[in-house]
Amino acid sequence: MTDTPSALSLTAIRKTFAGLTAVDDLYLAVEPGALVSLLGPSGCGKTTTLRMVAGFERPDSGSIWIGGEDVTRQAPNNRGLGMVFQSYSLFPHRTVAENVAFGLRMGGASRQAQAEGVARMLDMVHLRGREDMYPAQLSGGQQQRVALARALVVNPRVLLLDEPLGALDKGLRESMQFEIREMQQRLEITTLLVTHDQEEAMSMSDQIAVMQGGRILQLGAPNDIYDRPKSAFVATFLGTSNLFTGTVAPDGQHLDSPAGRLPLPESLPAGRRATLSVRPERIVLGGAAAGLPQQLTGRITASSFRGSHAAYRVVLDASGADLTVYRQADAGLGQVGLALGDPLSLGWRIEDSVIVTAPEGEE
């Protein structure tokens, strides 16, 4: 028995394939009722981690605990899990009702219990009246709801979501993000989600585990990770960030970089190499930058209208480096407010910058 209060706990998990390390000394604890996302690029180990929790892969070392029980060596069907795949994996020859009832039937539930469970879940996913339809007769969003109902009807200890919205178009995907999150919170079901979509992770999660190279680089609430990334990788993978690498000045309060001397949000040892991260929406342009701690100058080389805001590429005069800057839409509908070639000054508040570990090769 483990002394952790977590609903799901992974301890020192390691997995290799043909001598290549897919997951390396991974630790993760998911509290009861929380939704945690494993977020990262292809090959980072997130799907392998989910498959080990599900029991489809066995770790080379380490342990997996669910509800205080060591399930590391247990078969998938004995772990009390529900799972939704990207492809949904519905039975095409079975009706909606038969698909949803499958887990209950395999578990030996009576016909009445199956019928009651199906009715309850189809009400929850807004598919009542479609019991006798087949998957091919449903839209992608409806198929996703059936897969979710099938996973939840057995009252799983942990719900696993493997890129569940990847097959949907953008509008439907965003709508389903709200629906799944609302349902997960209402049922208070512990959930582990795998995704490479940053917006999906930020909108649905209680916590995000950003992965690279088989390890979790940073774990925290979405706003904490976005506002306070610890590494250049996290800063640039979860959203967009402008990075400034240089040497800490003798006063320990500034960074001497190719862009100029920049104020640091905290003191660092003089002479140390450091990297500063500033989000595009935190950079102030033009006259509004007057009075800020630093004054950089540059010219706009590209711009695009993105609905709620305009995005600009600014080339700095001092270094020739490109910066990305977001500015809330303040021009006419469908227009950007600044023109190509416009010279301008820019800056940011000291507290809107974050010290991160440098990109690879720039330490």
Image (cartoon, rainbow, N blue to C red):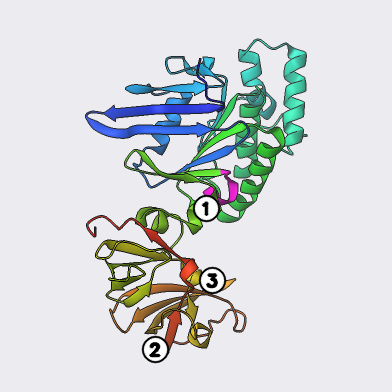
The secondary structure making up most of the magenta span is helix
Question: Which numbered marker is on residue 306?
Answer: 3
Q: Amino acid at mark 1?
A: Asp
Residue at image coords 42%, 15%: 73
* Contact? badges 2 and 1 (CB < 8 Å): no
Q: Amino acid at mark 3?
A: Arg
The percent coordinates of residue 153 (x first, y second) are: 67, 25
Looking at the image, residue 129 sits to the left or right of residue 267; the answer is right
Q: Is residue 3 above or below residue 168?
A: above
Q: Is residue 296 above or below residue 155?
A: below
- Give the camera-side residue of 97 and 108: 108
Snapshot quadrant of residue 7: top right
Snapshot quadrant of residue 99: top right
Snapshot quadrant of residue 265: bottom left
- Between the C-alphas of marks 1 and 3, the distance is 25 Å
The percent coordinates of residue 205 (x first, y second) are: 57, 45
Q: Earlier in the sequence, mark 2 or mark 1?
A: 1
Quarter that holds the C terminus = bottom left
Question: Which numbered marker is on residue 341?
Answer: 2
View extreme (front): residue: 251
Q: Is residue 55 visible?
A: no
Task: Check disc 1 and report the residue beneath it.
Answer: 224
